[in-house]
Amino acid sequence: MSAPRVVLIGPPGAGKSTVGTLVAELLGVTFRDTDTDVETETGSVIADIFVDQGEVAFRRLERAAVRRALTEHPGVLALGGGAVLDADTRRDLCSQHVVFLDVSLADAARRVGLDTSRPLLLGNVRGQLKQLMDARRPLYGEVASVVISTDGREPADIAGEVVRTVRGTGPAGEHRP
Ligand SMILES: Nc1ncnc2c1ncn2[C@@H]1O[C@H](COP(=O)(O)OP(=O)(O)OP(=O)(O)O)[C@@H](O)[C@H]1O
Ligand SMILES: O=C(O)C1=C[C@@H](O)[C@@H](O)[C@H](O)C1
Ligand SMILES: [Mg+2]
């Protein structure tokens, strides 16, 4: 059993996958993403899981992937944007060093653009993102040890700040406000 050095959370477009990869390089550890874990486990891309099995089934798969990764991944872990919707996941995150990568609606919408791999954002990207961010902001805040704003910043700059929060903390959770 080993816990991640840092867990990244935040809405789609926050840069969890992009920044997480850089953080892992800086720390000399591996990067893992629960979205990728679900896709590997099922052999399907997330967009297809939503179509074929529905969101409830996806959340069940996601919950299992998060639980597994929290107990067996010793590096940098990025969670899917909606993973914090699960109360058991939020409880599990209480003992972890969790960084909330925050992003404004404008920057997130610009970053995800017309990418069709995010099923919850299809149709009206800005409207869907706004609804989702408004509903989830309190949940991200509830489990975050640290909040880092990513607006207008380069991924490398953000990754450096994440690493400083990791190095500035002792046991997981010590940084918690
Ligand atoms: N700080 C940044 N500035 C500009 N573009 C960025 C930044 N961070 C990420 N991006 C770009 O935004 C897009 C989304 O980034 P990424 O996939 O890392 O987000 P995510 O938080 O992992 O999203 P999801 O929850 O959908 O997995 C990518 O095209 C990426 O290159
Ligand atoms: O915000 C969300 O609910 C999602 C974000 C992605 O990371 C994927 O987990 C999936 O597309 C759902
Ligand atoms: Mg991602």
Image (cartoon, helix red, strand yellow):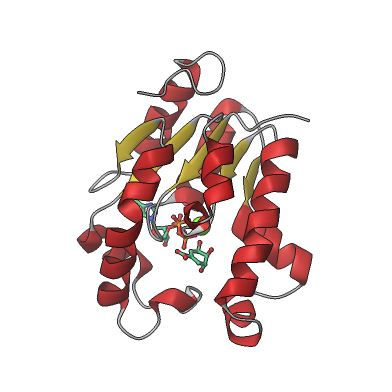
Q: Is residue 1 left or right of residue 153?
A: right
Residue 109 in picture, x, y percent from top left: 28, 67
Residue at left 36%, top 37%? 158
Q: Is residue 153 visible?
A: yes
- Left or right of 96? Residue 15 is left
Nearest the camera: 175 or 33? 175
Decide: is 43 above or below 23.
below
Quadrant of residue 1 within the rendered picture: top right
Q: How many marks?
A: 0
Query: Which of the 4 image quarters holds residue 36?
Result: bottom right
Q: Position of residue 139 (x, y in %)?
A: 38, 48
Task: Name the image quarter holding the C terminus.
Answer: top left
Q: Residue at x 32, y 60 (%)?
A: 135
- Residue 149 shown left or right of residue 32 in the figure: left
Query: In the image, is residue 170 above or below residue 9?
Result: above
In the rendered image, the vertical position of residue 160 relative to residue 64, given as above or below: above
Give residue 151's position: percent from left, percent from top.
24, 48
